[in-house]
Image: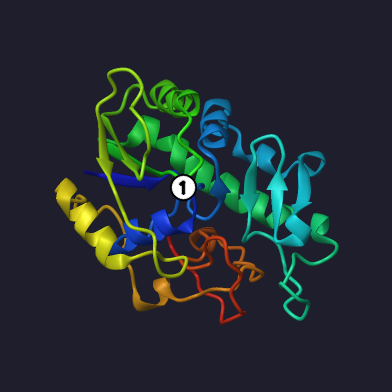
Amino acid sequence: MDHIVSLGTACETAYNLRRHYDFATAYPFDWWISGTGGVAHLIRDGAAADLYRVEDLEAWNGGAAIRNTRYDIRLHHEFPRDWRAPGQPVAAGWTEHVATPRRRTAHLTRRFFGLAGTARSVVFFRMFGQADSSEADTLALLNALQHRFAAVPTGVVFVNHRGPSPGNWPIEHITVGRRGDWRGDSGAWDAALSSLRLRLTPGLHRALGPQDLRVQAAATMIPEVEHAIDPPAESVGGHSHPPERPISIEG
């Protein structure tokens, strides 16, 4: 298999895929908190830069994250935070910091959609939350993938999906117990992923280094060079992390 891509629902999926299969390449859905319908809508639209139109953004849950109201995607790690305030909310004046995450996401989006013309094979992983198994949303996601990646041999793996798979789609299902912090249960992930017997083609991706799995501050902005545009591998999901030294990750 040449490419393994996370479609969310949050950082736990991307973190464990990278860790288990030993690759550092990032994709746009890695660190967002997203519903299946929103992911389907965004893939179908094909314009992730639209996530950063200020008129579609709002401070969600008292500043816990910035939410795109069009796609219902929470941009948890893209804006500076007030680390001194209770709950470490997104800092006031966050609208002035849209350019950097928009540029980073544009880079990752080019990579994601570019697979349609360059990849020999791709497996997409989507993890489902407890209230996120709408059959209509699931079908919309599968249709969006088919629409965008029709020319590429693809596979789809659903993690913790509740309910029947729509139609006759060839989908693999795995179940991962939910425990621990945002990383999830690494043992459960390893067991479930090993059952799929996937092997990532050697030499196509940079392997993870020790620095790639360090916790990275959500507020830290990545240096503006092409090889360092990828989001940090552990500025992830549903939680705020205290600031640390910036980490450049080449994708």
Q: Quadrant of the N terminus?
A: top left
Identify the residue shown where x is 40% and y is 54%. Answer: 13
Left or right, 91 with reference to 178 = right
Q: Residue furthest top?
A: 167
Secondary-structure class at tag 1: loop
Q: How many marks?
A: 1
In terms of depth relative to the viewer, which is nearer, 233 or 32?
A: 32
For image coordinates 84% across by 64% down, the residue present is 92
Q: Please indicate, yes or no, whether residue 198 appears anywhere in the rendered image.
A: no
Which residue is at 52% across, 42% downward?
Answer: 109
Residue 132: give x, y in percent of width and height.
49, 39
Badge 1 is on which residue?
A: 8
Q: Is residue 46 above or below residue 217?
A: above
Q: Can the viewer see residue 116?
A: yes
Left or right position of 99 against 200:
right
Observer-nearest residue: 116 or 10?
10
Please tell me which residue lies in front, 65 or 29.
Answer: 65
* On screen, residue 186 above or below 119: below
Residue 42 pos. (x, y %): 57, 33
Q: Residues within 10 Å of mark 1 (few under 14, many from 20)?
A: many
Q: Amino acid at mark 1?
A: Gly
User: Dividing the picture into quarters, in which one does residue 166 lie?
Assistant: top left
Query: Which residue of the protein is positioned furthest toward the right in this rendering?
Result: 93
Image quarter in which the C terminus is found = bottom left
Colour scheme shown? rainbow
Residue displayed at 41% across by 71% down: 212
Q: Is residue 110 above or below residue 167?
A: below
Image location of residue 78, percent across then percent down: 65, 59
Residue 229 rendering spot, x and y as whole percentages: 54, 59
